[in-house]
């Protein structure tokens, strides 16, 4: 019998309700934030721990085991020379993208000013920007984003319907992007809260756009 099958069953709300069943699978603390990180593609345990400040190693290991049992993630070994284990989302796990986007939109008003104790990673702004690009109607494309906190890239619209592949990634784009955006975290937060649209922010000079792709051209056209 596999280790996953020998594990004791998780607590359940024991309610015949789809919301309760969903929370049985993803309602534990840290689970949805692990999904957020894995939307960037396969990640090693050490990478996940580094980008989830505040989580203990024991809790992270426990959540990853629970997520594998629920069919949200898989664990596999990379071929040599890497030979490390990585975690990645299954199709079921990737189906949580719209849930995270909706949750982020709902919670955007809670951001306010950044507190001294708040950790931040540049790629945490990827999902709000993905939604802003979709609302701007700029079409599909690879977009590179530059913040003071770091660079990341995302796939505008193309990954929104559960297609395979990462939704975003850390660092510069893995190829010539359709657009490069330069902005600050304050503007990112305003976009997430819906206080401004991406096209408006470009017109106002709060977002600088370069590139010759269709996404860049659409944003510059306003």
Image (cartoon, rainbow, N blue to C red):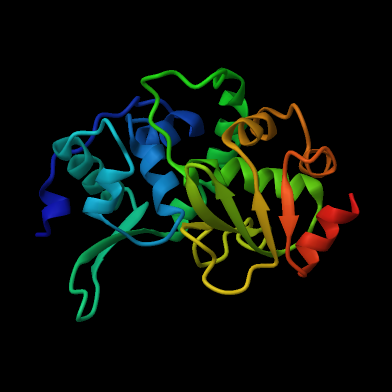
The quarter of the rendered structure image containing the N terminus is bottom left
Tally the numbered discs.
0
Residue 53: % across, % down: 29, 35
Side (left or right) of 59 relative to 149: left
In the displayed structure, would residue 81 be above or below residue 134? below
Q: Residue furthest bottom?
A: 80
Side (left or right) of 46 relative to 41: left
Nearer to the camera, 210 or 78: 210
In the displayed structure, would residue 132 be above or below residue 170? above
Nearer to the camera, 106 or 122: 122
Residue beneath the point at 59% across and 53% down: 145
Residue 75: % across, % down: 26, 62
Residue 121: % across, % down: 43, 41
Residue 132: % across, % down: 71, 43
Quarter of the image where one finds residue 81: bottom left
Residue beneath the point at 33% across and 34% down: 30
Residue beneath the point at 57% across and 65% down: 163
Quarter of the image where one finds residue 213: bottom right
Side (left or right) of 180 relative to 94: right
Residue beneath the point at 25% across and 67% down: 76
Q: Residue furthest right?
A: 221
């Amino acid at each position: 019998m596999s280790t996953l099958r020998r594990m004791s069953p998780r607590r359940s709300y024991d309610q015949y309700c789809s919301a309760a069943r969903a929370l049985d699978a993803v309602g534990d603390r840290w689970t949805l934030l692990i999904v957020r990180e894995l939307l960037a593609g396969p990640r090693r345990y050490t990478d996940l721990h580094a980008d989830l400040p505040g989580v203990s190693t024991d809790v992270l290991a426990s959540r990853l085991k629970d997520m594998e049992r629920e069919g949200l993630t898989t664990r596999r070994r990379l071929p040599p020379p890497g030979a490390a284990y990585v975690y990645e989302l299954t199709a079921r796990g990737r189906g949580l993208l719209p849930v995270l986007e909706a949750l982020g939109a709902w919670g955007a008003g809670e951001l306010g000013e950044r507190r001294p104790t708040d950790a931040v990673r540049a790629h945490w702004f990827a999902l709000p920007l993905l939604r802003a690009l979709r609302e701007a109607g700029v079409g599909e494309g690879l977009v590179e984003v530059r913040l003071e906190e770091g660079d990341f890239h995302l796939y505008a619209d193309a990954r929104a319907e559960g297609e395979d592949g990462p939704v975003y990634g850390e660092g510069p784009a893995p190829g010539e992007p359709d657009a490069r955006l330069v902005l600050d975290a304050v503007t990112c937060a305003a976009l997430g809260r819906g206080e401004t649209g991406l096209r408006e922010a470009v017109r106002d000079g709060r977002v600088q756009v370069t590139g010759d792709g269709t996404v860049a051209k659409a944003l510059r056209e306003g």
